[in-house]
Image: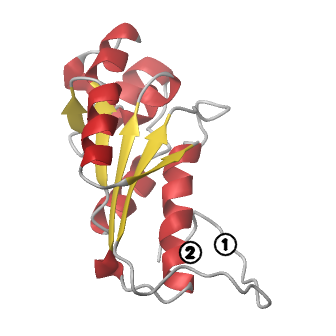
Amino acid sequence: MIEGYGAVEPIPNATFHLDRGIDYRVVFDCRTAATADDGVNPGLDRIARFLNLLEQDGIPPGRAKLAAVFHSEPTKATLSDAAYRRRLGASNPNSELIGLLKEQGVELLVCGQSVVSRGFGLDEVDSRFVMAVSSMSALAVYQLRGFALLLE
């Protein structure tokens, strides 16, 4: 489903699989940064992996509603290409994957508190992200709406 990201391996002898009768509502708590400024954020890659696992187990795309909340160190992954280039000297290495995830309907949020505390301008965030007042409030709302929480 997300080619080039979120690698999965077939496990032919697995007896536990995703349940095809469930609608998957999952929110990812993305709080780990890439190890280098030119690396893909591990949270974004993990979301791609989950989508690929859903596909591998035959879950139709319409049966999954995924969201991700970025905060703390990985906030820089949410910067627009222009802001990333201005601050780090290169285009945002996450931009392609962000686009692929958005095409699959993944809701991407960033913690406004983290944006400000990391010294970024609110206007520097990629327009494909929704600005949340805080990651705590966003994660609480998603969980209260029935989303399962996956931590990094």
SS under mark 1: loop
Are the residues flagged by discs 1 and 2 in contact, CB closer than 8 Å? yes
Residue under the image location 49 percent in, 30 percent down? 74
Q: Residues within 10 Å of mark 1 (few under 14, many from 20)?
A: few
77 left or right of 130? right
Q: CA distance from mark 1 to mark 2?
A: 7 Å
Q: Quadrant of residue 77?
A: top left
Q: Amino acid at mark 1?
A: Val
SS under mark 2: helix
- Answer whether residue 24 is visible to the viewer in this image: yes
Q: Label 1, on which residue?
A: 8
Q: Which tag, 1 or 2, sits closer to the chain's start?
A: 1
Q: Label 2, on which residue?
A: 53
Quarter placement of the C terminus: top right
Nearer the observer, 23 or 97: 23
Up the image or down, 30 lies above or below 5; here it is above
Q: Residues within 10 Å of mark 2 (few under 14, many from 20)?
A: many
110 left or right of 11? left
Q: Position of residue 105 (x, y in %)?
A: 27, 64
Q: Position of residue 36 (x, y in %)?
A: 65, 31
Residue under the image location 31 percent in, 16 percent down? 113
- Answer whether residue 40 is visible to the viewer in this image: no
The dot on residue 133 is none
Up the image or down, 45 lies above or below 65; here it is above
Q: Position of residue 5 (x, y in %)?
A: 57, 63
Residue under the image location 37 percent in, 86 percent down? 60
Q: Amino acid at mark 2?
A: Leu
Up the image or down, 99 lies above or below 151; here it is below
